[in-house]
């Protein structure tokens, strides 16, 4: 079933409580996905590049030998970043299996990410000048507390609660997905692509790798490739409705925009609120009301709809 949510604050600034608000929305939809929760949060973009790196899954059995491995892998990640030409400005141990890294880097992101992922167990969850992806097992409140998201300030973001059906319950199969190796693009999705394997093979032939078996990751890379070729986010999303088959609703975010798309059947719900200072959307209205304390009017966009807002 799963639940998706998104917020973009109008007027810029990048100082709204995006972590707090997305947590409230996702927790209101806990019944739609108790297995894992994830956030793609955007701050004011700057010259430095931000990486979120997973060293291991949080459900991996822990012992003294494993702890030694993690310490060694962290040191190897740091060495591989420097070997790729990155100037590490700050590296934070978010918890025992997750790193947040701010660095100066002018090269190819794929080159950098591949260097990191040459370390056993390491996976780059996100890369961008504004984007950080945070995801783990448990409900939204549990993940938010574990990653100190209540104080996370930003301009826009998306979130997802997952009910695992076909793939494992682990961080790699949790949403959102970064559009490797493109900067600052992420997607959450409710539904199913029926031509998933066709698009995966096509994108792999172009040199892309995928961290999961999830079709949401295909959508993210598809859109990022269109953006890289010069399309606007709205153009790329409209083309996706012709190219991607299935029943789906998705939300895509880039450095300065948030967009939603519904396929031509519109079987997967999405409720929308547009106000003077923010746009809020979610699988259920109760999630929108979790962050708004005044009377609101919402609506459910029609089939085949694409809408995009900038911050």
Image: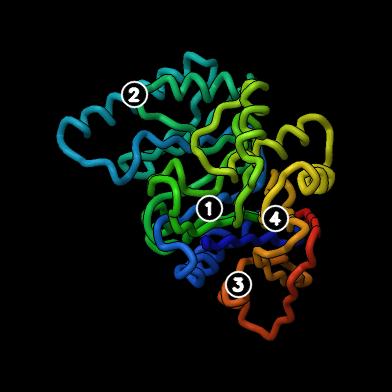
**In this rendering, is residue 72 above or below 42?**
above
For the residues labelled 2 and 4, the Cα–Cα distance comes to: 35 Å
Residue under numbered circle 3: 284
Quarter holding residue 95: top left
Percent across and percent down for residue 86 are 53, 21
The alpha-carbon separation of the residues under discs 2 and 3 comes to 43 Å
Q: Is residue 301 left or right of residue 269?
A: right
Q: Earlier in the sequence, mark 1 or mark 3?
A: 1
Instruction: Please name the residue shown 41% across and 23% down the image.
Output: 78
Q: Is 153 situated left or right of 134 in this image? A: right
- Mark 1 vs mark 2, CA separation in Å: 26 Å
- Label total for image: 4
Q: Position of residue 24 (x, y in %)?
A: 51, 69
Q: Mark 2 packing: few (<14 Cα in 10 Å), some, or many (20+)?
A: few
The nearer-to-camera label among 2 and 3 is 3
Going from N to C along the chain, the mark reached first, 3 or 4, is 4
**Dot 4: what SS?**
loop
Mark 4: few/some/many CA within 10 Å (<14, 14-19, 20+): few
Look at the numbered discs 1 and 2 and tell me whether their residues touch, using CB distance below 8 Å: no
| Quarter of the figure that contains the C terminus | bottom right
Local secondary structure at mark 1: strand
Mark-to-mark CA distance, 3 and 4: 28 Å
Q: Quadrant of residue 281?
A: bottom right
Residue denoted by label 2: 75
**Residue identified by numbered label 4:** 13
Residue shown at 37% from the left, 61% from the top: 142
Q: Would residue 48 be visible to someone looking at this image? A: no
Q: Residue furthest top?
A: 83
- Among numbered discs 2 and 3, the one appearing first in the sequence: 2
Q: Which quarter of the picture shows residue 67? A: top left
| Numbered tag placed on residue 39 in the rendering | 1
């Amino acid at each position: 079933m799963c639940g998706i949510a998104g917020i973009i604050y109008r007027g810029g600034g990048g100082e709204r409580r995006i972590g707090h608000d997305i947590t409230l929305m996702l927790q209101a939809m806990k019944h739609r996905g108790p297995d894992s929760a994830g956030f793609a949060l955007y701050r004011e973009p700057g010259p430095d590049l931000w990486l979120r790196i997973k060293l291991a899954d949080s459900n991996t059995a822990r012992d003294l030998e494993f702890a030694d491995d993690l310490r060694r892998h962290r040191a190897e990640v740091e060495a591989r970043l420097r070997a790729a030409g990155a100037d590490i400005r700050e590296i934070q141990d978010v918890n025992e299996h997750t790193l947040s890294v701010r660095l100066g880097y002018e090269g190819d992101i794929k080159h950098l990410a591949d260097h990191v992922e040459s370390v056993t167990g390491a996976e780059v969850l996100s890369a961008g000048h504004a984007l950080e992806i945070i995801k783990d097992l448990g409900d939204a409140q549990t993940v938010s507390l574990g990653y100190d998201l209540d104080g996370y300030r930003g301009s826009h973001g998306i979130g997802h609660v997952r009910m695992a059906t076909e793939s494992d319950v682990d961080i790699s199969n949790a949403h959102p997905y970064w559009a490797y190796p493109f900067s600052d693009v992420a997607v959450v999705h409710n539904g199913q692509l029926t031509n998933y394997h066709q698009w995966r093979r096509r994108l792999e032939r172009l040199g892309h790798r995928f961290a999961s078996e999830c079709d949401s990751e295909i959508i993210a890379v598809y859109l990022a490739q269109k953006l890289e070729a010069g399309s606007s986010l709205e153009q790329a999303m409209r083309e996706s409705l012709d190219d991607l088959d299935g029943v789906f609703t998705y939300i895509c975010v880039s450095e300065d925009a948030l967009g939603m798309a519904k396929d031509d059947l519109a079987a997967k719900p999405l409720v929308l609120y547009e106000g003077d200072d923010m746009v809020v959307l979610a699988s259920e209205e109760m999630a929108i009301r979790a962050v708004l304390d005044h009377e609101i009017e919402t609506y459910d966009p029609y089939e085949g709809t694409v809408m995009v807002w900038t911050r």
